[in-house]
Image (spheres, rainbow, N blue to C red):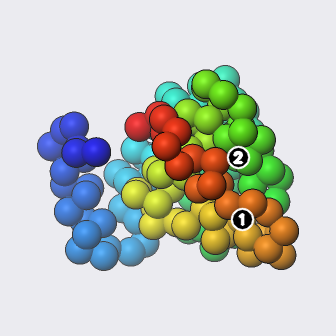
Amino acid sequence: MAPKSAAALVLLAAMIAGLAPPLQAQIDVFLSVVDSVCSGDGAMNSCARQLVPSEGATIPPYCCSALLNAAITSGGGTWCACGFRKMAAAFLGVDVDRRCQAANNGRVAKLKDFCMGAPDGI
């Protein structure tokens, strides 16, 4: 999906350039989108806020469970979980699938399996 604003285009250029750690603007956009798309979902908002300071190094197992549970539901839950996954990759450079596999010793299905072809909220 193409960026919808000049700010998004600048952030995309920064990501392509490989700037790390994520710029504060990228973090702000990620948190804002999670707040918007997953409004009212305390678990997703909490997970987003825990993911940022760790720079994706760790994802608590309960976050992975919450993402998977949301993804297998229809409608808003899938929209939220798949959007979270996509935005974590785009704005933070975090592979949620891989981090969740590591957090659960490989015992967890990959979120992407549930998100393929699903609306992702973004």
**Element at badge 2?**
helix
**Element at badge 1?**
helix
Q: For the point 62% across and 55% down, which residue is it?
A: 113
Q: For the point 68% across and 61% down, which residue is it?
A: 110
Image coords of residue 81 (percent x, y):
61, 42
Image coords of residue 19 (percent x, y):
31, 74
Q: Quadrant of residue 106?
A: bottom right
- Say which quadrant the C terminus sits in: top left
With 77 as the anchor, is 88 left or right in this view? left
Q: Residue 14 versus residue 120: which sits nearer the camera?
A: 120
Q: For the point 77% across and 41% down, which residue is it?
A: 69
- Report if the CB atoms under discs 1 and 2 are less than 8 Å apart: yes
- Say which quadrant the N terminus sits in: top left
- The amino acid on which the numbered mark 1 sits, given as a three-letter code, is Cys
- The amino acid on which the numbered mark 2 sits, given as a three-letter code, is Leu
Question: Badge 1: how crowded within 10 Å, few (<14), some, or many (20+)?
Answer: many
Q: Count every numbered label the image shows and give the total.
A: 2
With 54 as the anchor, is 24 left or right in this view? left
Q: For the point 25% across and 58% down, which residue is it?
A: 12
Q: Is residue 23 above or below residue 69?
A: below
* Disc 2: which residue: 67
Q: Residue 18 versus residue 89: which sits nearer the camera?
A: 89
Question: Badge 2: how crowded within 10 Å, few (<14), some, or many (20+)?
Answer: many
With 81 as the anchor, is 89 left or right in this view? left
- Which mark sits nearer the N-terminus, 1 or 2? 2
Residue most extreme to the left: 6
* Disc 1: which residue: 100
